[in-house]
Each structure stands twice: as structure tokens, then as C-alpha cells.
Image: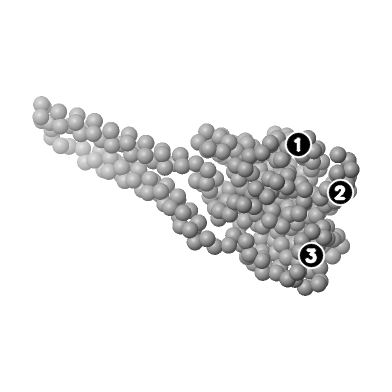
Amino acid sequence: MDNQSHTSLLSIVVPVFNEQEVFEEFYRRVSNVLSSIAMQAEIIVINDGSNDETLQIVRTLRDQDSRLAIIDLSRNFGKEIALTAGLHKANGDAVIVIDADLQDPPELIPELIKEWHNGYDAVYAKRKARDGESYIKKSTAHIFYRLMQRVGRVKIPEDTGDFRLLSKRAVQALSTLNEHHRFMKGLFTWIGYPQKAVLYNRDPRFAGDTKWNYVGLLNLAIEGITSFTTAPLRIATYFGLITAAGAFIYGSYMLITTLLFGNDVAGYPSLIVIVLFLGGIQLTSIGIMGEYLGRIFNETKQRPLYFVNRYEPSQAALKTEDLVDTPASPKVTADKIR
């Protein structure tokens, strides 16, 4: 295994969006880790439409380190798509997916590689603790993962983010999945193959501000739920059946009491409450159906997942990729489409 390690290639995929405050420290720590492992390596940085100095910082570092590759997307496509773009370009026998904010420690990478050598195709980092995060964020994340465990067809590991190692065949399997509404945590699990957790403590963000607000996290949760289960549609059906049954029972009761005892037909407020209640259920059900219909609409357009403004490969990529349609310069300009 040691001989194989020296000839194996490790790809580290890092999507970035406005990470100028943290990227240099991230690169330093990753480089220290790579110097301690017996594998060749490339670091693939996907610039997801950053509007600060992130891209310039990465290019400066690339001038000093040929292991760095840059995928500069034509605009901000979102983290899930940026991550997909990086996986498409990863050349490694093993691929590490990690964020640049240093909440996920690069120092855990050797442990992930160790489990990969033990035969696992996916080794995911599972959080024991989430330092530096609010009680609300921790609680909502706890609820979301447990909810997905119960209603989802794919059992997404609890308390697990994107930080993980994937084998070559796992990455190749992911590359065949071309849906636009991508919830990568679910797709990582959906492909199957032997998987194992490695426990760790998640650190606070090293610098800068998080790019995820509560609205974004809510949208991501909706994306995950609607991507991997039709349970919301079934729940809406159950609500409709229960409401219809309740209305039938109540109507029967009103009919019987009116025939037997008469009825003064008082209760305007209760009538308004019932109308609003039924209207709320109807609008909620329509909204749930609209979420699924919108996803069908987007998928049927079959647009490319992303466009690349500029691709600057690593030295490892230059050795493995056929760049016949690109200039001889190691800085490759390409409008590649997936």
C-alpha cells in the first residue's frame, strides 16, 4: 500500500465564494498536511463568482505552486454546482471535498485517507461538536437531519456536511448525475458503495462571514427534502383527507342537530376560522405541488449545469488530460460546458 500511495494522486476540491480573508491560511494548512502524506496531490479551487480578491489571491498562490488548479465559473452558480464542477475536473484516485472556511480541519485528511486504504469508497467527517455556531442553527440542523432520516428514501448521515473523501469510482458515479437541483449531501449517499464515518469537532469559522443565512439554509433544506422524498406530497394528501373527513363528520352532525333540535345559525367568527383554515391547507398543498412542478420545469429545459470562464489546470491535470484544443501555455482559456 505504501508503494501505491507514492504513485496515487489526491485531488482536493475547494469551492470558494468571497473567501479573501481565509484562503491563504487555508492553503498554508492544507500544504502542511500534504507534505506529511505519501501521495501526489492537486488542489482544485472553484471560484463561484467571487467579487472580492479571492481569485487574485488564488492565482498568486498558483504561480508559486503548480499543484493548484483554478476553475473560474462565469458567474455565481451556487455551492452545489461549484462543487460539481470541481468533481468533474478531479483527476485523483481519491478526492477530498472541503470548504475553505477552516471549520472543517484539513488535519483530518490523513485519517480519511487511512479509511480509504481500508477499502471504503466514501469516508465522511461526522461532527461531534459544532463550535462557534448559534443554538438556533444547531437546533435546526439537528431537526433537519433527523427529519431526513425519517422521511427520506436515502438515509443521509446525521451531523455530516460536505467534508469527505471519495474514491475514483464514487466520483465517476456522481459525474453521471446531471440534475440541476443538486443536494450533494444526499447524492454522496445515494450512489452507495462502502461508506464510513470519521468523528471530529467542527471549529468556528477562521475569518470572514458565513455565506449561509437562515433563508439560504431553509432553501437548502427544502432542496434536500424535495430532491429525495415525495413525503410532503403525501402529507398534503393526508391533510386533505383528514380535513374532508372532519368536514363530513361535522356536516353530518349539523344536519342531524338541525333536523332534531333546530339551529339558530349563529357563529360568524367560527365560520371565518373554518374558511381560513381550509384556505390555508389548500394554499400549502398548492405550494408543495408547485415546488415539485418547478423542479420538473427546470429539469426539462436541460440547460448546462455551469459555464467556465477560465480553467487553469494543475501540473497533474496537464499530465493526465488531453488539452488538444487549448493553447500551449499552462494557463488554459476554455469555455467548457457541463
Residue at 34 percent across and 45 percent down: it is 282
Please state if 22 lies on the left or on the right of 82 as rendered. Answer: right
Task: Please tell me which residue is depicted at 81% across the width and 50% down the height of the picture.
Answer: 9
Report the residue marked by disc 3: 59
Density class for disc 3 (Cα within 10 Å; few <14, some 14-19, many ≥20) is some
Marks 1 and 2, the one that precedes in the sequence: 2
Which residue position holds label 2?
Answer: 7
Q: Quick check: 226 left or right of 282?
A: right
Residue at the image position 87 percent from the left and 62 percent from the top: 64
Question: How is colour applied across the structure in the image?
Answer: one colour
Is there a contact, CB below 8 Å, between mark 1 and mark 3?
no
> Is residue 111 visible to the viewer in this orientation of the structure?
no
**SS assignment at label 1:** loop
Where 77 falls versus 144 (above or below)? below
Q: Which mark is residue 119?
A: 1
SS of the residue at dot 3? helix
Measuring 62% from the left and 47% from the top, which residue is drawn there? Answer: 184
Indicate the position of residue 295 as horizontal and vertical percent values. 48, 53
Disc 2: CA contacts within 10 A as few (<14), some (14-19) or many (>=20): few
For the N terminus, which image quadrant?
top right
Which percent across, then down, holds residue 314? 80, 60
Q: Quadrant of residue 55?
A: bottom right
Compute the Cα span from label 1 to label 2: 17 Å
Between residues 228 and 46, which one lies in front from this camera angle? 228
* The image quarter in which residue 324 lies: bottom right
User: What kind of residue is marked 3?
Assistant: Arg
